Amino acid sequence: MRLFIYLLPMRNLAAIILAAGKGTRMKSAMPKVLHECAGLPMLSYPVKALKDAGVKKIIVVVGHSKDDVIERFRSEKITFVEQKEQLGTGHAVMCAMKALRGFKGGVLILSGDVPLITVETLKALKNLHCKGSKILSLITAVPVNPAGYGRIVRDENNAVIGVVEDKDASSGQKKIREINTGIYLISSGFLFANIKKIGSANAQKEYYLPDLVRLAVKGGSNVKALTLLDPEEAMGINNRVELAKASAIMRLRIVNELMLSGVTFIHPETAYVENFVKIGPDAIIHPSVHLGGQTVIAQGCVIEQGAVIRNSHIGKNSVIKSSSVIDASVIGEGAAVGPFARIRPGTVLENHAHIGNFVEIKKSVIGKGTKANHLSYIGDAVVGANVNIGAGAITCNYDGFKKHVTIIEDDSFIGSDSQLVAPVRIGKGAYVGSGTTVTKDVPPGALVITRADEKIIKGWVKKRRKK
Ligand code: UD1
Ligand code: CA
């Protein structure tokens, strides 16, 4: 019977994430777990890994700036519990026990500041745990520099018998290179029975969660350790140097995955691609490109150096040239943008539209095949297909009080250096002469021109020089 229970797969998993600490070394007004790693708050990563590992109940222990943390994760299915005073990791877990009442199964415990942890590792811990006594298992690592971490103490048979914190370690123990990553899987029964037994008689006068290891061993249980081959994965972020390091690793993970799915990165080290960005095969991403938010880059696009694209959709085979900025917009297929173009929120460029250098577009629709290749401002406009917008053309959409709409119908021609004072409509196929200020609607097929007659005064220069 006993054997039978051991072999049962562990279906029931809950998790406690410790995130009540201040993160003093971040030197920040913002709680540590809200600092972003590759575009997401640090805490999102363990939450995501736990969900992917099949954990249904996630409890997050909050304390410092708890309201900010709760607010940021409002939409997630998380139970928050408060630890009013930060008396140590063991105490943080004590605070979470109420929320676990009635739960039977395995409890994963980890810190909110380990963004690089992967679902594969959590699953490996689960497997190892199921093979052992199913009381307590933990993840260890052997980093180059173990200073600051709790060290794993093993007996002469190499069995784990305890964890000693750096501040409590003897000089001999400080030489141990195997460290506690702070990630545990503990049976709920053992946790309920033992968490209150942890004391605070140590160098930091704190309730140390790893003391459970000694209690488990004392109770005759075999504690299993999963030793990571890659210590980076369990890296705890304590300051901004470590945050930058973890972000770089995270970004490289994202980019590597994209490369394996068929995207070319000319210089992966300098690509800044956030989580959730989707890129189709055969897209080419040049150096120093920033792709953020819910951006989608379709197949075959070329994104040139220095482009910044956020929350936008770029259609197939479009080219976004150097140093262009695109925000919350939709770009059609086969379109060209930039270099040095700025596409502001709410813009839709239809297929094969061409937007050139120093053109700013805001909340406008630009029709199929339309071109605005140089130095323009187009705001709150609806521009039809095959329109040519000359250099320096401007929609004057703001009268100092309100924004107004400009409508430019298909096949029209907007001459260089013209101003369209909104609200105004340029009819289909109409021509706006260069330098014109349009204030009235222009009927289809008409020419509008507001230019003073040109005067040529022969010999004027010579006369002036004589003076
Ligand atoms: C802890 C472990 C150490 C391990 C290391 C791995 C203990 C006593 N030591 O040390 O063995 O090597 O992690 O990174 O557990 N927290 C609370 N409430 C508290 C105290 C901490 O929620 O009262 C949270 C912190 O916000 C943090 C996590 O627990 O997310 C770890 O706390 P921290 O103080 O960083 O522990 P370490 O000293 O790093
Ligand atoms: Ca830490």
Image: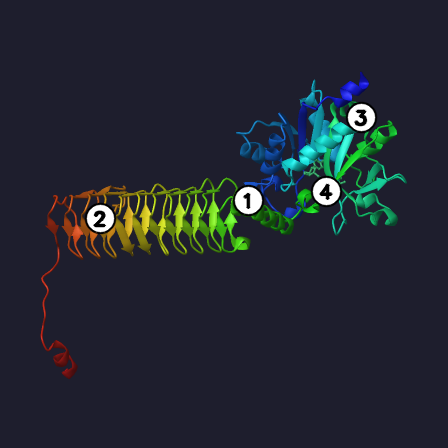
In the figure, 218 relative to 204: above or below? above
Q: In this figure, which residue is indicated by the disc labeled 3?
A: 194
Q: Nearer the viewer, mark 4 or mark 3?
A: 4
- Judging by the rendered image, the residue that carries numbered circle 2 is 387
**Nearest to viewer (mark 4 / mark 2):** 4
Q: Callout 3, which amino acid?
A: Asn
In percent of width and height, residue 282 lies at 45, 48
- Callout 2: SS: loop
Q: Nearer the viewer, mark 1 or mark 2?
A: 1
**Earlier residue among tags 1 and 2:** 1
* Secondary structure type for disc 3: helix
Q: Is residue 338 left or right of residue 160?
A: left
Residue 111 visible in the shown view = no
Residue 397 versus residue 6: which sits nearer the camera? 6
User: How far apart are the alpha carbons under marks 1 and 3?
Assistant: 42 Å
* Residues marked 4 and 2 touching at CB (< 8 Å): no
